[in-house]
Image: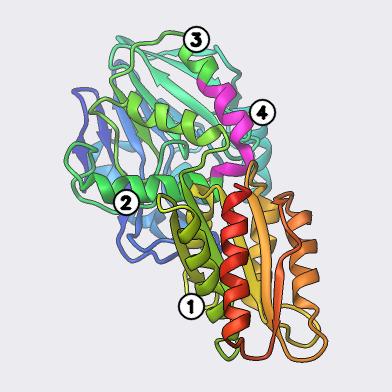
Amino acid sequence: MSFRITDKVAWVGKIDWELRRFHGDEYSTHRGSSYNSYLIKDKKNVLIDTVWTPFAKEFVENLRKEIDLEKIDYIIVNHSEVDHSGALPLLLKEIPNTPVYCTANGAKMLKAHYHENWNFKEVKTGDTLDIGGSKLTFVEARMLHWPDTMFTYMSGENILFSNDAFGQHYASELMYNDLVDNAELYQEAIKYYANILTPFSSFVAKKIEEVLSFKLPLDIIAPSHGIIWRDNPVQIVEKYMEWAKDYQENQVAIVYDTMWNATRRMAEAIAEGIRSADKTVAVKLFNAAHSDKNDIITEIFKSKAVLFGSSTVNKSIMHATGGLLDMIKGIGFKNKKAAAFGSYGWSGESLAILNERLNAAKLEVVSEGIKELWNPDKEAIERCVRFGADFAGRL
Ligand code: FEO
């Protein structure tokens, strides 16, 4: 499959409908993904990014149908991660001397991945490449989301090739934002931001402000995953600015794991208490062991507060809650309030451990939390309802 985006630019990537896990098992891709590669035919011919390694052979064979490979003048690598650079070794066996444009970090990382001394041309922000009618301008986008990342802007066609930024793990043959289901599109876009870009939000805001200050005309944003933004592309830029500034909605997430349902009953009673105090807040409950971890992270990203609950097991907390707390610490959410709860039988360490982990993740713990012995009775449930109402009052 390939298709024309403008007279000069064609999509020559791969739609991966089967993909269900990305970055090992770290990221769920319920709707598959795509690896977007772009071929520009101007006075010079340019390839921007490639596809993930398992599709290298298919990619090179398809590319050969679009262009005599010898006629590719330049290859641009906006980002060295293998989902975009994976076909380079095979392609460069065919056209070994073709210049590879990337940042200095990009060249280092490509060498470290593939141990090849390709014809690297290192570029910095503001460097340009004249390709005939159009000009390509490079913009380093360090930590969006790797140190090597850059954007490439094509004048004339007014296209920003943004690599991972503004992308989504979303397979669709329709390929454009005005053609796909926008609820699905935004769900995948916010999940991508929440799970992959949140740690780099300060870089995101600064980079967007810098790019906007260039006042470049922008007709299309062509990311390296998912659909292409051609209908009002600035809409996703504006969303990124909102998401980058400690985003939150009027929502509280309650995340728990439970052995014999005592902690689940506490979670439901706390939810009832929050709702009794504030009828406008959306309260969402997630059993950490039964729910997709990246979907939970997305819901926490959207929340102004999060409650974590776990039974005590072996003087500790249950493993699904522990794994999520590690993820949250790494992601580094800001401006989120938190509290802990849990049931116990004898020693009851879970509450203190949850509090310690929430503090370590730099969430703002607003209460000491609540723990209940064995199966909560009527009075215990009422305490949890009151705890929920009190928590809502602290938000
Ligand atoms: Fe889609 Fe960071 O690679």
Instruction: State the separation of the CA atoms marked 1 and 2.
Output: 32 Å
Q: Which of marks 3 and 1 is nearer the N terminus?
A: 3
Circle number at residue 290: 1
Residue 246 horizontal side relative to residue 219, left or right: right
Name the kind of residue labelled 3 in the image. Answer: Ser
SS label for mark 4: helix
Asked if the residue at tag 2 contacts the one at tag 1, i.e. Cβ–Cβ closer than 8 Å, the answer is no
Q: Which of marks 4 and 3 is nearer the N terminus?
A: 4
Q: How crowded is mark 1: few (under 14 residues within 10 Å), some or many (20 or more)?
A: few
Asked if the residue at tag 3 contacts the one at tag 2, i.e. Cβ–Cβ closer than 8 Å, the answer is no
Residue 17 seen by the camera:
yes
Residue 338 horizontal side relative to residue 293, left or right: right
The residue at the point 61 percent across, 82 percent down is 379
Say which residue label 2 marks. Answer: 14
Which stretch is magenta?
Answer: 197-208
Instruction: State the separation of the CA atoms marked 2 and 4.
Output: 27 Å
Name the kind of residue labelled 2 in the image. Answer: Lys
Q: In which quarter of the image is residue 25?
A: bottom right
Asked if the residue at tag 1 contacts the one at tag 4, i.e. Cβ–Cβ closer than 8 Å, the answer is no
Say which residue label 3 marks. Answer: 213
Q: Is residue 276 above or below residue 370?
A: above
Main SS, magenta residues = helix
